[in-house]
Image (cartoon, grey):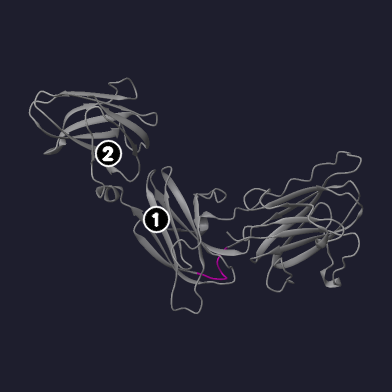
């Protein structure tokens, strides 16, 4: 997480900045600007920009700092400045990583907002007066103008499972709040375990500190998963189980917008059967109740339904009785001879009353058997119990 501090310093006397720093912001104004290495720096804060405003005693002020490139932070100090002690502070009160600080001014005077950050990038600073000493209602601020979508379908590049693409982030790429990006689209199914990796190309003058985001198609505000260095070094990697069928967007970008260059992006789908094949079947005994879960990593049958496998031995004439219960899906049981795992001896769906299964069988000859615990229909996920009667 990149930490960003936004500092609001309240100063009526005793704190004077150079004339070059006397930028003014007024009630109802929003300033779009950019924090970079040329801005002044002062510990314990990082590079900063400074804005002055005038307020009357009793003014209720609202300071909002928003950015897609940084994690805004806002502090409020009394008239004596930073050395006088903090009055209030906020980190993520504006939703997401944005800051929203509300405070009622005690004394009339000139006040200072200092915007500082560990990182650099574009941001917006707005100042509103939401009340006065007389508590007279003020007209609400005008609604913000509709924003252009940050990511457009015209920028999409198709990508499929098992494919790699060599790309390059450059100053000519689209820009979202100071960060360039490339946009890729792929189609997946519910339960797919998507594996996305982004690697900066080696042997180049600059190596990207890559950053990945996965979002539903057309909805950049809903981040399903994101990663900075999960791929080792400065590389990114996301492993995410898709919740629904449909199209998804991959946003391939960089932590530092000033560092651009080539990269490799790869999309894979973890094979559920392959992941489950290394898991041995679970033995079950008469009188035992076991708990399990159907996931996207289980084996699947010809109808694409996930299933778990339980094994046991039985003698000739033995009466078998199994009950499967779940509140997450419609339970379904199948019994097979161990030497014929694709030929069911008996199946049951709702024998215990929907949605629970109840399977009974009299063993004709002693042998080894397989019980499949699954769902009635493909794509079901969730927990369940299986009970084998004594």
Query: What main secondary structure does the magenta stretch of the protein show?
Result: loop
Q: Which residue is denoted by mark 2 in the rendering?
A: 308
Give the side of residue 279 with respect to residue 182, left or right. Answer: left
How crowded is the residue under tag 1: few (<14 C-alpha within 10 Å), some, or many (20+)? some
Determine which of the numbered discs, if any, sits on residue 219 in the image: none
- Report the span colored magenta: 169-174
Q: Which residue is denoted by mark 1 in the rendering?
A: 195
Residue at image point 37% right, 31% down: 329
Query: Is 130 included in the stretch rendered in magenta?
Result: no
**Image quarter hosting the C terminus:** top left
Relative image position of residue 351 (x, y in whole percent): 27, 21
| Circle 2: element type | strand
Relative image position of residue 271 (x, y in whole percent): 30, 51
Spatial CA distance of label 1 from label 2 is 24 Å
**Frontmost residue, 301 versus 156:** 301
Relative image position of residue 32 (x, y in whole percent): 72, 60
């Amino acid at each position: 997480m990149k930490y960003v501090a936004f500092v609001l310093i309240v100063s009526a006397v005793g704190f004077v900045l150079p004339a070059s720093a006397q930028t003014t912001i007024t009630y109802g104004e929003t300033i779009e600007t950019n924090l970079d290495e040329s801005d002044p720096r002062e510990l314990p804060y990082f590079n900063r920009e400074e804005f002055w405003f005038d307020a009357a005693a009793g003014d209720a002020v609202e300071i909002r700092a928003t950015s897609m490139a940084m994690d805004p932070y806002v502090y409020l100090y009394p008239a004596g400045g930073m050395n006088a002690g903090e009055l209030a502070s906020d980190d993520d009160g504006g939703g997401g990583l944005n800051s929203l600080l509300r405070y009622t001014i005690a004394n009339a005077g000139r006040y200072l907002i200092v915007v500082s950050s560990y990182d650099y990038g574009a941001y917006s600073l707005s100042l509103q007066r939401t009340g006065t000493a007389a508590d007279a209602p003020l007209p609400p601020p005008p609604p913000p103008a509709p924003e252009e979508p940050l990511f457009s379908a015209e920028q999409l590049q198709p990508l499929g499972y098992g494919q790699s693409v060599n790309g390059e982030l450059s100053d000519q790429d689209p820009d979202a709040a100071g960060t360039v990006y490339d946009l890729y689209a792929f189609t997946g199914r519910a339960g797919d375990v998507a594996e996305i990796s982004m690697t900066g190309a080696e042997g180049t003058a600059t190596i990207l500190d890559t950053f990945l985001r996965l979002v539903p198609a057309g909805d950049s505000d809903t981040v399903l998963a994101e990663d900075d260095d999960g791929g080792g070094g400065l590389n990114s990697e996301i492993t995410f189980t898709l919740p629904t069928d449909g199209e998804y967007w991959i946003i391939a970008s960089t932590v530092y917008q000033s560092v651009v260059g080539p990269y490799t992006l790869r999309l894979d789908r973890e094979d559920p059967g392959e992941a489950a094949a290394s898991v041995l079947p679970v033995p079950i005994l008469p009188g035992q109740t076991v708990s399990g879960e159907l996931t996207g990593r289980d084996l699947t049958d010809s109808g694409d339904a996930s299933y778990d496998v339980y094994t046991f031995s039985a003698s000739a004439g033995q009466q078998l009785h199994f009950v499967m219960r779940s509140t997450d899906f419609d339970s379904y049981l199948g019994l097979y001879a161990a030497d014929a795992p694709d030929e069911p001896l008996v199946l049951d769906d709702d024998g215990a009353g929907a949605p629970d299964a109840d399977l009974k069988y009299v063993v004709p000859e002693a042998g080894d058997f397989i019980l499949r615990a699954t769902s009635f229909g493909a794509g079901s996920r969730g927990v369940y119990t299986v009970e084998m009667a004594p």
